[in-house]
Image (cartoon, rainbow, N blue to C red):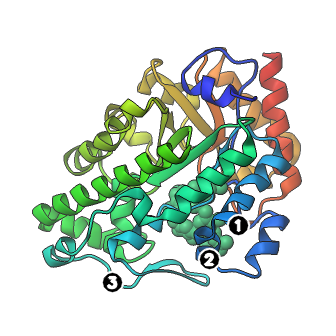
């Protein structure tokens, strides 16, 4: 039974620093590609047996300290009447983006099991197969990040449509955020009920906002989700990508652990967040392309910055790149474990 990750989430003493990687299941792994070559990404997500198998691939191969359920932050759109597709080379595409009050009014708020029964079934399967040996993380997109896809209709560089609604039609924005928040809380509570032992909230694109706008248009919704999980007792990791300028506000929204990207020193980020929280991060995912010796130096520097204070979970500063080499990822995990044990 390896509960080092869960103990670190609670800032309890640990023998070594736990590590897992955002997007640890994916295209950089041969075993993943063997399945992916015969299925679309969404088919894989919607098939609980496949999702469970792919969840366990990095666990067996990399020696990480936690599994994260193979799913996607966009799956709840299935239950919101939004037509999601992943187009080759272009990523996610929502064919009927939300732009008006009428569009918002049409969105139903379903329970988690109704919305995405296959995610909950995959969680139950993974828990059974892990037999308590390793904890399983569930996740969802944070309201801003999910709303950005729903409004833009896909990935975006500057979030013009999103900001246009935020500033130009704030009543529509707030009603959409209300619905996204309710759906996400249902989605996450169902994941916990199905067996998720920690939750990560991904605010992948929130770095597009000034702190004033984060506070005025976003903070309360992320907070509502995190507060709404408190009675479950499950630790919440609140990850704000590109969030160096937002750290205090993100911490205010909540999270037992705050996830940070690589653009800031971990010790500086931790002192700003407050040492009464855990911290997760923060190696630049591109460092996996550096010579092993340089990668190891950068890993050790992060571990040195964390020091002996409990509550650090090692991770990349964002998702792993699909060109990464598995051997280098294994070396990364070993370096974290060995160096933090000696410390
Ligand atoms: O961490 C894990 O191993 C769990 C799996 C996971 C996926 N997506 C699988 C996936 C997680 C945690 C996510 C979250 C997710 N999805 C986020 C937040 C994390 C982040 O990176 O900020 C976001 C923004 C999405 C939306 C999304 N899904 C995009 C933009 C894309 C396309 C990007 C690309 O690289 O093509 C996806 C697809 C996706 N989600 C893949 C995987 C393994 C690749 C699908 C494939 O096989 O083609």
Q: Residue at x 60, y 68 (%)?
A: 45
Q: Compared to 308, does 222 lie above or below?
A: below
Q: Are marks 3 and 2 in contact (CB under 8 Å)?
A: no
Q: Which residue is mark 2?
A: 43
Quadrant into which the C terminus falls: top right
Q: Compared to 205, does 269 lie above or below?
A: above
First in sequence: mark 3 vs mark 2: 2
Q: Secondary structure at mark 2?
A: helix
Q: Residue at x 80, y 63 (%)?
A: 29
How many numbered discs?
3
Q: Residue at x 57, y 31 (%)?
A: 266
Q: Secondary structure at mark 1?
A: helix
Q: Which residue is mark 1?
A: 50
On residue 337, the disc is none
First in sequence: mark 1 vs mark 3: 1
Q: Which residue is mark 3?
A: 96
Query: Depth check: 149 or 125 in front?
Result: 125
Question: Which x, y percent locates residue 267?
Answer: 56, 25
Query: Depth check: 276 or 96 in front?
Result: 96
Residue count near mark 1 (Cα–Cα under 10 Å), binned few <14, some 14–19, many ≥20: some
In front of the other: label 3 or label 2?
2
Ligand 1 shown in quarter: bottom right
Q: Compared to 214, does 76 lie above or below?
A: below
**Alpha carbons under labels 3 and 2: distance apart:** 21 Å
Pointer 3 residue Cβ closer than 8 Å to ligand 1 = no
């Amino acid at each position: 039974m390896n509960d080092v990750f869960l103990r670190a989430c609670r800032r309890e003493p640990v023998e070594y620093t736990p590590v897992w990687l955002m997007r640890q299941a994916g295209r950089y792994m041969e075993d993943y590609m063997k399945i992916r070559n015969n299925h679309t990404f969404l088919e894989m997500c919607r098939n609980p047996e496949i999702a469970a198998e792919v969840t366990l691939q990095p666990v067996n191969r990399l020696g990480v300290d936690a599994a994260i359920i193979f799913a996607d932050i966009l799956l709840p759109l299935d239950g919101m009447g939004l037509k999601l597709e992943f187009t080759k080379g272009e990523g996610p595409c929502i064919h009927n983006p939300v732009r008006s009050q009428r569009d918002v009014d049409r969105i139903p708020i379903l329970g988690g099991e109704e919305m995405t029964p296959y995610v909950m079934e995959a969680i139950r399967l993974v828990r059974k197969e892990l037999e308590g040996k390793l904890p399983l993380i569930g996740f969802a997109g944070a309201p801003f990040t999910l709303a950005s896809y729903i409004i833009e209709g896909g990935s975006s560089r500057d979030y013009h449509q999103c900001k246009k609604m935020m500033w130009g039609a704030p009543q529509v924005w707030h009603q959409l955020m209300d619905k996204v928040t309710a759906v996400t809380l249902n989605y996450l509570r169902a994941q916990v009920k199905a067996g998720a032992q920690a939750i990560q909230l991904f605010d992948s694109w929130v770095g597009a906002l000034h702190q004033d706008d984060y506070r005025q248009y976003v903070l309360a919704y992320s907070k509502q989700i995190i507060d709404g999980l408190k009675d479950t007792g499950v630790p919440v990791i609140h990850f704000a990508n590109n969030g160096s300028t937002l750290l205090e506000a993100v911490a205010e929204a909540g999270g037992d652990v705050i996830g940070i990207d690589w653009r800031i020193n971990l010790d500086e980020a931790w002192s700003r967040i407050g040492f009464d929280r855990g911290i997760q991060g923060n190696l630049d995912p591109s460092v996996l392309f550096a010579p092993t010796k340089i990668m190891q130096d950068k890993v050790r520097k992060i571990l040195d910055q964390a020091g002996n204070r409990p509550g650090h979970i090692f991770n990349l500063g964002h998702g792993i790149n699909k060109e990464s080499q598995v051997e280098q990822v294994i070396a990364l995990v070993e370096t974290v474990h060995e160096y933090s044990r000696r410390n």
